[in-house]
Image: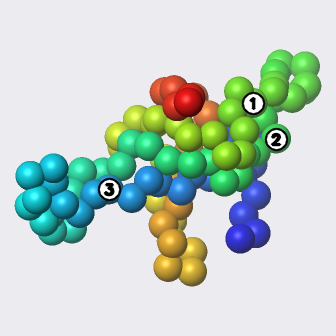
Amino acid sequence: MNLRPLGDRLVIKPTEQEEVTKSGIYLPETAKEKPQQGSIIAVGPGARDEDGDRIAMDVQIGDIVLYAKYSGTTIKIDGTEYLILKENDVLAIVEG
C-alpha cells in the first residue's frame, strides 16, 4: 500500500470484531460495535511547532493502539478498510 499520511496523522488498520459472542451467538454486521483498537501501518512526519521544527510522534509503525470510537476518517483501499486519524485521537498504546 502506498499511503503516506501528512503532519501528525496516522493510518490504522482496525482490529476485526468477533462474529460470535462468548456464548456462541453469531452477530450480524449491523450488531457489531465500531472497533476502537487497531494496528498502525503508516505514520506521518509529525506536526510542526511555532518555529517550524517537527514534533516527534509518540507512536510508530506496528504499535497496537486504542482510539476514540468515532474519530478519524474511514477509507477503503483494495477492499481493506483503514482509518486515518490525528495522533491526539490515540488514547493509549497496548503493550505486552
Residue 65 lies left or right of residue 50; in this view the side is left
Q: Residues within 10 Å of mark 1 (few under 14, many from 20)?
A: some
Q: CA distance from mark 3 to mark 2?
A: 30 Å
Q: Is the Cβ of the residue at disc 3 closer than 8 Å to that at disc 2?
A: no
Q: CA distance from mark 3 to mark 1?
A: 28 Å
**Relative image position of residue 17 (x, y in whole percent):** 32, 56
Residue 71 visible in the shown view: no
Find disc 2 in the rendering and name its residue: 45
Q: Residue at x 83, y 19 (%)?
A: 50
Residue 41 visible in the shown view: yes
Residue 49 lies left or right of residue 43; in this view the side is right
Observer-nearest residue: 4 or 14?
A: 14
Secondary structure of the residue carrying numbered label 3: loop
Q: Residue at x 16, y 54 (%)?
A: 21
Of pointers 3 and 2, the one earlier in the residue sequence:
3
Find disc 3 in the rendering and name its residue: 17
**Relative image position of residue 7 (x, y in whole percent):** 75, 41
Q: Residue at x 47, y 59 (%)?
A: 74
